[in-house]
Amino acid sequence: IGLNKINNFEIKIALYSLKIHQHVKKYRSTKLANDPELFSGQIYTGEKGLEKGLVDEVGSIVRVMESKYPDAKLDFPVE
């Protein structure tokens, strides 16, 4: 891989990360934890994501679909 391709890739990743940060801050600003490490690239799952304000609840896609769309006919196996 040439140097130009690596630099181009790094630039695309940086721009994509910036867009994600802006989107999360715009739509979750009142829910986000005041944590300087929040946008450090760390991956948060489950309870930690909930603690940081990145998600509203922890659960499966099936449970979310059933609670938000009770009349929907799900095409995949229900837990």
Image (tube, rainbow, N blue to C red):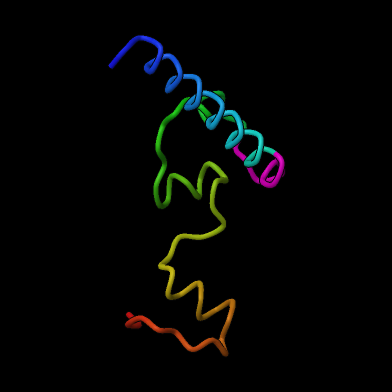
Q: Residue furthest left?
A: 1
Rendered location of residue 46, percent (x, y): 40, 52
The stretch of residues the image draws in magenta is: 26-33
Quarter of the rendering containing residue 59: bottom left
| x then y, percent, for residue 50 | 50, 50
Quadrant where the C terminus is found in the figure: bottom left
User: Residue at point 48% right, 89% down?
Assistant: 73
* Quadrant of image for the N terminus: top left
Position above or below: 31 against 7: below
User: Eyeballing the image, is 64 above or below 25?
Assistant: below
Residue 41 image-quadrant placement: top left
At a point 55% along the width and 79% down the height, the residue shown is 67
- Indicate the position of residue 7 as horizontal and vertical percent values: 43, 14
Q: Is residue 30 left or right of residue 9?
A: right
Residue at left offset 50%, top offset 72%: 64
Instruction: Say above or below: 41 vs 48.
Output: above
Residue 19 occupies quadrant: top right
Q: Residue lying farthest top? A: 3
Left or right: 22, with 36 as reference point: right
Residue 75 x %, y %:
40, 84
What's the magenta bit mostly, secondary-structure-wise? loop
13 or 38: nearer the eye? 13
Residue drawn at point x = 54 percent, y = 52 percent? 55
- Of 50 and 67, nearer the camera is 67
**Tally of marks:** 0
